[in-house]
Amino acid sequence: MQALTAGDRVKAQEELEISTSILAKISGVATSGGLRLQLIEETALLKAALSDASPGQEVMSQPNDQEEEEDEADTEAAPDLVAPEEAQKLAPAEGEIVSIPELDVSGFDVPIVLNEQVRAYILYYQTRKQGVMNRAFERSGRYLPMMRGIFRDQGLPMDLINLAYIESTFNYRAYSKAKASGIWQFIKATGNRYGMKVNYWLDERRDPEKATRGAAAYMKELYGMFHSWPLALAAYNAGEHRIQRAIERQGTTDFWSLKLPKETELFVPAFMAITIIAKDPARYGFTAPVEEPWEVERVTVPGAIDLRSVARVIGVPSDVIHDLNPALMRGVTPVASAGHEISLPLGTKEILLANLDQLPRSSAREVVRATGRWHRVRRGETLWSIASQHQTTAAGLANLNGVKVSDRLKAGALLRLSPAKPSSDRATTFARSTRSHPGVARALEVTPPSSRSTVHIVKPGDTLFGIARAYAVTPEELRRWNDNDLRGQTKIRPGQSLRLSSGQALQVVAQTVKGTRETRRGAPASTAPALYHRVKRGDTLWAIARVHDVTPEELRRWNDLGRQAKLRAGQDLMIRLSES
């Protein structure tokens, strides 16, 4: 953006290609959801700015509810923990020591066989897939209590929940080459069969609770067909009709004797290996999930309501609301809907209901322009053929996606058909302000401007000092503004609402805009707004600094870290916006 402002389009294009490459390599867990989405939106804005076509000349397609579309900013490739192409690598290499503890398989509520395939997968997950498994265990704790309740209601074995590790590593954003989506990896047809809507506005396969109810119902149905959990699991992978035909042709109901597609033959041993590890993760070198109850409040709101507006009204960061409502693919309730149920953090339902009439409505065209349009490349397609389908030019598509017209397209890749456009005055302000100071956008996400008092909903692990620091105020001010709620209390409680002063958000934004100038003049560093990075297992100071475009030395200075200081998982590191 700096290069473009200076008129150096060549330099801007070079920097953009580097930025896009870095973003593609960063997994969703490496940054907070809001920051990663912001970075993707900023690169999209820059691509639009570098395009020869002016924004007013773009060809806009209207949403088609029959299309299944994915937004690159909010999907990730589904993990391949079965990996048929790596089957030959599963056996221990020569000289490799395999140490798998003796195991009593009678302690499981589904049949477990500890054969060579299962042993090989246990080793595979301990070694080549260790990082993937670590992230899966970190994510799963959020959903496990909810899933157990649903499976218990359906009378299903609890060990079947471990199938979610294989399917998606508990990532609701997972999307496979076969167009399966969500934690339980439903394809569209099967999702529809179990009550999950999939259209331009919604993909309810990504809703953790709805998808889990669908997965439980599907597995119960499969067991009713085959009366065997190995066969039911094989059918979950390959489809019930394929397994039924294999049984009829081969004359056996023994899974281990059936000849099936390679992936399906390996799918069941992989599930058994995951189930063995999940029973006692520490025994196999992993940290057990930290379980948190999936507790939300549900409220029905009109169609065409932007989740960012909801976040502003209840006083929480917008990425929190998006995270609780992953089925809303455009971040907006379906435009034509009379009412759509959304999930909210505990303690915020009444706040939203009291302010429901203040929520602005978006038109379908505004939403389409805000999110842009995407095309998933099919085998044999070229930029020319895709451009012809969508009434645009190959050169325009190439500019928009940072490729050359002559480049070969990879099947399954996503191409943007139109740049994302701000859908509101706030979004326009966001787009402009990030060019001069990216910190403004982050400050707006934390404390959106309002003429009324802003509310912070206390989350587990929050402290009064930490909340005060995040909003650039003092704990004493928070106590004064919340005198009635905090009187006589020594600790704050999760779900509790804390009021901020009516002008606080504007103060934070103003500090951000002029932060660099004031810092150079010697303004106290403590007045600078900040964001916080929660350290995850495996994080290093260098890696965190690179993600946030700061230096390790700055991180040490802002957080009083010595040269020999070690990072701890769960630790919060401050990044000062006016200096970063």
Image (cartoon, grey):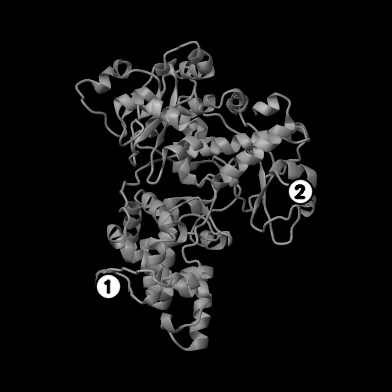
Q: Earlier in the sequence, mark 2 or mark 1?
A: 1
Q: Secondary structure at mark 1?
A: helix
Amino acid carrying mark 2 in the image: His
Q: How packed is label 2: few (under 14 Cα within 10 Å), some, or many (20 or more)?
A: few
Residue 231 is labelled as: none
Badge 2 vs badge 1, beta-carbon distance below 8 Å: no
x and y, in percent, of residue 201 in the image:
58, 46
Q: Is residue 452 above or below residue 101?
A: above
Query: Which residue is more in the foreground, 383 or 237?
Result: 383
Amino acid carrying mark 1 in the image: Val
Relative horizontal placement of residue 173, taking residue 212 as reference (left or right): right
Residue 139 seen by the camera: yes
Residue 390 is labelled as: 2
x and y, in percent, of residue 575 in the image:
44, 28
Q: Secondary structure at mark 2?
A: loop
Q: Which residue is mark 1?
A: 105
- Residue positioned 46% across, 57% down in the render: 168
- Residue positioned 33% across, 73% down in the render: 112
